[in-house]
Amino acid sequence: MNININSVIGDIVAQNYKTAEVFRSYGIDFCCKGNRTIKDLSESGNFDVEKILNDLEKAQSTGVDFGSEYNTWPLDLLADYIEKKYHRYIEEKIPLINEYLTKECKVHGQGYN
């Protein structure tokens, strides 16, 4: 995703979950206030937008993208890769995921009883 000053915060996170940590580190609500643009942040005067844009670009470029090569891998290699790459990452991020989930349930959960 090409992120620029007119990009919507919630859309950025929806396109790449790694960007959520950037917004979180700046104290920017990307959930309930995710309809704002990066430009809105700059107009508030509280943020160094160039630094945020750089951090978002870095977050998007982390990790290795093998593209469609996954389709050619033997299943045992693919299973090992998924376990090592994603299961370990999720285990590490469970506290943060729980924090986001708890917030979502408090804010939006009453509509899903």
Image (cartoon, rainbow, N blue to C red):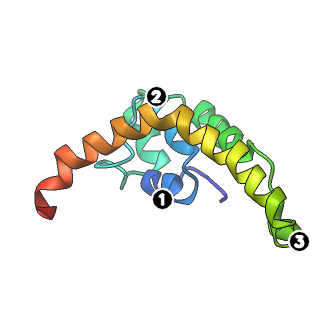
| Image point (62%, 30%), residue name | 51
32 left or right of 54 in image: left
Q: Which residue is label 3 attached to?
A: 72
Whether tag 3 and tag 1 are in contact, CB under 8 A, the answer is: no
Query: Hey, which residue is sitting farthest front in the picture?
Result: 76
Across and down, in percent, residue 3 comes to: 62, 53
Residue type indicated by callout 2: Tyr
Across and down, in percent, residue 106 comes to: 18, 44
Q: Which residue is label 2 attached to?
A: 26
Image position of 46 with respect to 58: above or below: above
**SS assignment at label 3:** helix
Which of label 3 and label 1 is nearer to you?
A: 3
**SS assignment at label 2:** loop
- How crowded is the residue under tag 3: few (<14 C-alpha within 10 Å), some, or many (20+)? few
**SS assignment at label 1:** helix
Q: Quarter-wise, where is residue 85 in the image?
A: top right
Instruction: Give how far apart the Cα atoms at labels 1 and 2 are.
Output: 17 Å
Residue type indicated by callout 3: Thr
Residue type indicated by callout 1: Asp
Q: Nearer the viewer, residue 27 or 45?
A: 27
* Residue 7 appears anywhere in the view: no
Q: Which residue is label 1 attached to?
A: 11
Q: Who comes first in sequence, dot 1 or dot 2?
A: 1
Across and down, in percent, residue 50 comes to: 62, 35
- How crowded is the residue under tag 1: few (<14 C-alpha within 10 Å), some, or many (20+)? some
